Amino acid sequence: MSRILVIDDDSQIRKMLRKMLATAGYAVAEARDGAQALDIQAREPADMIITDIIMPVKGGIDTIQEFTEKYPGVKIIAMSGGGFLGAEDHLTIPQRMGVVHTFAKPLEREKILSAVKDLLDQPCA
């Protein structure tokens, strides 16, 4: 069973993603920011992270960079609700970092599940 770590400072988003992914058969862990996610990853490695971009303590860009360096086999999906800029503007940076699947909030269930399956079906780089 693939393990996915959901990283978002919004507990409702984490809860929604946990329920959606668990129902689809994945093991799911949650973190409120990138710092907590890295602690969790060190103890209980995930195959994939789904991370928000704008978060306190350690945001998504720093989180993606650190996961890429420390855990190169981990698949990454980025999401954003916007902030001062629109969500699409915040998602261009992860795309430049090599994140293939990025999503603006609100999230669409079928698109997220399709992206998760697509990435987990790919061999590790």
Image: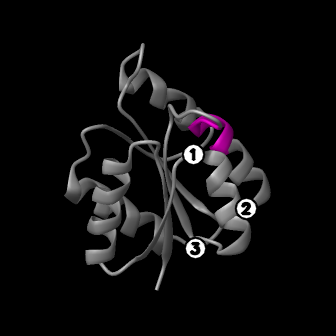
Disc 1 residue type?
A: Asp
Q: Nearer the viewer, residue 49 or 29?
A: 29
Q: Earlier in the sequence, mark 2 or mark 3?
A: 2
Tag 1 residue: 33
| Kind of element beneath mark 2 | loop
Q: Residues within 10 Å of mark 3 (few under 14, many from 20)?
A: few
Tag 3 residue: 123
Above/below status of 31 relative to 23: above
Left or right: 74 with respect to 105? Answer: right
The residue stretch that appears in magenta: 58-64
* Tag nearer the camera, 1 or 3: 1
Rendering quarter of residue 111: bottom left
Tag 2 residue: 71
- Give the residue at the far bottom of this rendering: 1
Left or right: 25 with respect to 91? Answer: left
Give the residue displayed 38% in from the left and 24% down from the top.
Answer: 82
Q: CA distance from mark 2 to mark 3?
A: 15 Å
Find out whether residue 59 is within the magenta segment: yes
Residue 68: image location, x then y, percent: 71, 52
Q: CA distance from mark 1 to mark 3?
A: 27 Å
